[in-house]
Image: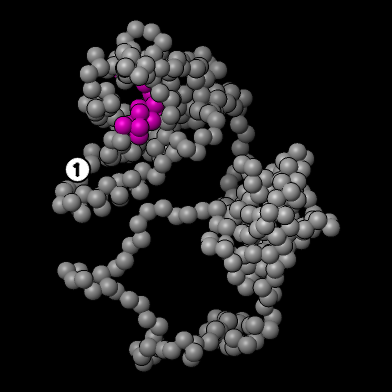
């Protein structure tokens, strides 16, 4: 099995079959932590021990037990008994049906993988399946035995390749009626619907995943590098959380619209690729604009490469989200916890804006 593959076999639809490999679509970023005894280099290890004697137990002496009616009673299951009913390591995955794209609710999705053709001969049927699913806006439904467990899977095209998502079985989905507490029936006024619609329009933007970064991960990496080089990190103080005052719904919607137009809405993650040099679009149907941006008028300077360099006035006119994007480009540490004013001050003093008037 090729490196990185978690499964290898044949995918078939009708009488068409092709060899494929399954590769993880995700890779968790960040350092892997280990545990040590304080003030020593001794690693902390975990052992399997007998809870009654405290003695370590060999793997060969461990069996599995499943609780029955009373949780204090268990039935012991031997490895041989489990192997007899296991689904086996199937090397075949057959499409059972095609369903409309978007028909499966988000709560059913679990893991994500890429399906990769495993031979040159598989390239044509692979491309055919990817193209026809994209044209007809459908997804392939199948089952797959992965890691000794049977999974319901959904296969579809994405970015020119086939992706496979494992799904939760229907009886594994929790009924929201059992979890969400009941609340009284309420009616929503048209006035509030209109205001909420304006707020949604004001905050509506295309999905650009590259604009989001893990702010905590950035700070963690900065901390590790600082400690490794004997430095101390000094992050700006976190802004005080907003008070959770009970506000009338209509007033809250109006205040949210006003806040968004000023650009002071809290950013979720590090976001923003809007650069100085492009004039802003209307931010809501109410007609408010976020302010004139640099590059289209006076105040913008050109570098030797022809790119626009922002002035202090340009920074003043930017929204918090745009400042966050510029701070990300400038590599300013601790930016994800900064207020709008702190972002503006940090950008004004950075090399990116050095020399701008």
Give above or below for 238 relative to 322: below
Measuring 68% from the left and 75% from the top, which residue is drawn there?
88
On whether residue 318 falls in the magenta region, the answer is yes
In the rendering, at what x and y percent does residue 349 appear?
A: 22, 26
Q: Write down the quadrant of residue 23 in the picture.
A: bottom right
Who's the residue at 58% across and 23% down the image?
194
Q: Mark 1 points at which residue?
A: 234
Residue 98 x/y as whole percent: 78, 50
Q: Where is residue 311 in the image (x, y as percent from the top left)?
A: 29, 16
Quarter location, residue 122: bottom right
Relative to residue 257, is residue 20 drawn left or right? right
Q: Is residue 325 left or right of residue 175?
A: left
Q: Say which quadrant the N terminus sits in.
A: bottom right
Compared with 191, 223 (above or below) is: below
Please state the extent of the stretch shown in magenta in the rendering: 316-330
Q: For the C terminus, which image quadrant? A: top left
User: Residue 123, how many percent across, how many down?
Assistant: 70, 50
Please say if 350 is above or below 76. above
Q: Which colour scheme is used?
A: one colour
- Residue at 51 percent across and 14 percent down: it is 287
SS majority, magenta: helix
Q: How many marks can you see?
A: 1
How packed mark 1 is, by other alpha carbons closer than 10 Å (few <14, some 14-19, many 20 or more), is few
Residue in the foreground of this view, choosing between 175 and 328: 328
In the image shown, does 328 or 322 lie closer to the viewer? 328
**Among all residues in the image, which is located at the extreme front?**
120
- Residue at 23 percent of width and 41 percent of height: 235
Is 38 within the magenta? no
Res 221 seen here: yes
């Amino acid at each position: 099995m090729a490196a990185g593959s978690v499964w290898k076999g044949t995918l078939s639809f009708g009488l068409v079959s092709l060899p494929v490999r399954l590769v993880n679509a995700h890779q968790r970023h960040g350092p892997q932590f280990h545990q040590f005894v304080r003030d020593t280099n001794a690693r902390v290890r975990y052992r399997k021990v007998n809870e009654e004697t405290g003695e370590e137990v060999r793997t060969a002496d461990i069996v599995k037990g499943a609780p029955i009616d009373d949780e204090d009673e268990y039935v012991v299951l031997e490895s041989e008994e489990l192997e007899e009913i296991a689904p086996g390591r199937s090397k075949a995955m057959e499409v059972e049906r095609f369903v409309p794209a978007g028909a499966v609710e988000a709560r059913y999705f679990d893991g994500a993988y890429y399906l990769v053709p495993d031979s040159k001969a598989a390239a044509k049927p692979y491309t055919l399946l990817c193209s026809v699913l994209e044209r007809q806006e459908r997804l392939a439904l199948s089952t797959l035995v992965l890691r000794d467990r049977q999974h319901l899977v959904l296969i579809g095209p994405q970015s020119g390749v086939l992706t496979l998502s494992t799904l939760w079985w229907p009886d594994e989905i929790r009924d929201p009626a059992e979890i969400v507490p009941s609340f009284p029936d309420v009616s929503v006024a048209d006035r509030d619907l209109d205001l909420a619609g304006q707020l949604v329009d004001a905050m509506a933007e295309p999905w650009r995943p590259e604009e989001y970064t893990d702010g905590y991960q950035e700070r963690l990496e900065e901390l590790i590098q600082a400690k490794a080089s004997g430095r101390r990190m000094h992050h700006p103080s976190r802004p005080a959380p907003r008070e959770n005052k009970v506000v009338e719904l209509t007033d809250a919607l109006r205040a949210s619209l006003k806040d968004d137009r000023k650009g002071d809405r809290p950013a979720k993650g590090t976001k923003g690729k809007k650069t100085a040099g492009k004039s802003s679009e209307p931010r809501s149907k109410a007609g408010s604009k976020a302010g004139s941006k640099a590059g289209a008028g006076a105040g913008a300077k050109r570098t030797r490469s022809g790119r626009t360099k922002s002035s202090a006035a340009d920074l003043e006119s930017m929204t918090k989200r745009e400042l966050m994007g510029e701070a990300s480009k400038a590599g300013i540490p601790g930016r994800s916890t900064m207020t709008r004013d702190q972002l503006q001050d940090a950008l004004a003093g950075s090399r990116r804006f050095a020399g701008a008037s």
